[in-house]
Image: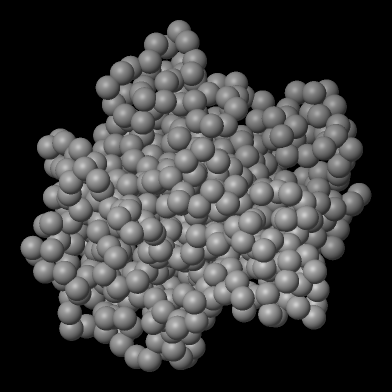
Amino acid sequence: MPRYRSSGPSLPRRTLDYLQHGAAEGARNAELFDATCQFRDAGIPLDDAEEQLLARAMADGLAEAEARHAIRSAYTGASREPVGAAVACPPPACQPRRPAPATATQGRPAVAVPGPMDGGFIKLIDACFLPDEFVAIAPAAVTDDGEIAPRRGVTLTATEWKTKVAAKGGIDRVFGTKLGLFIRINPTCKDGAKNDDVTAFRHVLVEFDRDEAGKPIPKEEQYHAVVASGMPVAALIDSGNKSLHAWIRVDAPDEAEYKRRVTTIWDWFSGINLDKQNRNPSRLSRCPDGWRTVEGDVRRQRLLALGIGAESWTAWEAGQATPDEGAMMPISQLAAYDTTCDPNNMLGKRWLCRGGSLVVVGQSGIGKSSLCMQLMILWALGLPAFNITPVAPLRSVLIQAENDVGDLAEMYQGVRQGMGITPEQEAILNDRIFIYRDTTRTGAEFVDAASALVDRHKPDLVWADPLLNYIGDEISEQRVISDFCCKLLNAVSLRTGVIWCLLHHTGKPSKDPKAASHWTASDLAYSGLGSSALVNWARETAVLVRIKMPDGEAPTFQLSMTKRRTRAGMVDSTGTPTDTIFVRHSQHGGICWEQCESPNSEAEAKPNRYKMGRKSAFDTVKFQAVLTEFGDEVTRANVSTLADKCAVTERTIWRWWKSLKNKDL
């Protein structure tokens, strides 16, 4: 593993700590993304960054695809000025995943707490308050009961405090008390001391020094928990006794939103036993460079760090994984979310994201299962399938009921031959594709079994082939779809982020030859058996259908994306983005699919008006001959008769008439 010269741009201490000790569950994505940004800012090539960061992230428990996508997403951003002391980058000590901040901290490896900063008071004022904002500072004194407690305090503007401190030679010279010195975490009005006096809901105080069992938490572990959260820490202060004080910068626009963000912080750190008195916005924290006395020992309160973690609260919230079910997503979070580098994206241009769903609909016996095999293999290798590109190699679990081991072997060997899979690639597939046969479980029992496989293999995609074998009830009823898909499958998706891919059959073809002659890609979505609730649930419905071809020509099929359309990334034979392509079984041996040219030039020119199973029947000479019988004109009175004579719909007659008049053909 490369080491970086201390004379050039280097990695900050926090990033080095992450490489050595990793991140806690719940902060893994945020820590990985932040560390990658530091690698990028230091000018370290992407390949070198991936070598170190992938090993670290996977040791923490992240899937390879998820980690690789986060790394590459960070490298698409603009580089900033590098930060941190010039320190060589050691090889990561990849250790087992540790508990999240939301659990007891016992057993975590020690992480060095930063040393004190000189001139901490002035640096805190500059970083956390505006020049004309009033800052309240309160010295401690002995009360009538003999207790040591802070007084109401003195308020001056930030500028006035800096001037006073400079004149006196330090804040400890302004207030000579050795009993303790406090500062309110948010600006107030003049002489303010209460919550109603707060003028900006900027900071929340996080402090803890004992776990829920009452056992002391070392400062090293306190520091690790704060850093691992990834939250924007405006300032970190050593209280001079057992605890660290972290000022989390939330920048809430009002008190109601401040309370929501406070609740978010407390939920995140649940189990760590935060000081519950610190929820209010006028809370007092230890003032840097002041003194306090503990059991007769006089100690200094010191500023340790500024600007740790995310750049802002909205950036931190936006960078979290898929939100919990039922959790509110504020507009500020949506405004800050970078959709161009979505860490949840798995395929295409946000075509399918973590927790999504895909239904592949096709006629019986046309090769849906072999198409599934081909998609799994290509995506497992990080390769595009029909130009649908994964963000990184994807892991798949296939649960199927229709094919025995011989059928599956034929499919795999056909794809291997058609795609030119090498022995080296085949070895990779062993670790990324997991195939099971299940012919007996249905409904909740099937989902429970599938959920156990998800926990075992941690896939990105789970394929169920076919849906009818596993749904376990009448598929035409909306209640059944809601119970199976919305309740059971979604529960697994929300917990794991897995994408469900369900293979499904079309119904019987209509006896009316005109029934589907003008279906668009959106119409095709409803060609599967059962309730339309299935289409509404699926994030994408892909439809594979055989189209009518002249005798002697190879069977040709139409593959359409009906909901997310061109987000999939497919292109036609001219390279134009489209929602529909044409495919055939391989002409070069093996069970394999390959894209072919459109058999319909009109459809090629208008990709959103593909027809299902029919080539255009328009013939200028024949149509003109029929029109002659009706005075060379189409009217409301004769359009029905013309449609019967030409064996097309009235809509087609009007379209042909328009084309004839405009001489388009």
Of the 4 image quadrants, the one containing the N terminus is top left
Side of 163 relative to 645 (left or right) = right
Side of 166 relative to 266 (left or right) = right
Residue 472, quarter of picture: bottom left
Asked whether 134 or 178 is in front, the reply is 134
Q: Which residue appears farthest toward the right when viewing the image? A: 190
Provide residue 516's location: percent of width, then percent of height: 52, 73
Side of 552 relative to 479 (left or right) = left
Can residue 442 be seen here? Answer: yes
Number of numbered discs overlaid on the protein picture: 0
Provide residue 663's location: percent of width, then percent of height: 74, 49
Residue drawn 86% across and 58% down? 197
Can residue 349 be seen here? Answer: no
Residue 233, quarter of picture: top right
Provide residue 544's location: percent of width, then percent of height: 40, 63
Residue drawn 65% across and 44% down? 312
Side of 438 relative to 345 (left or right) = left
Rendered view: 342 above or below 132: below
Q: Which residue appears farthest toward the left when viewing the image? A: 406
Asked whether 635 or 516 is in front, the reply is 635
Rendered view: 144 above or below 533: above
Rendered view: 157 above or below 494: above
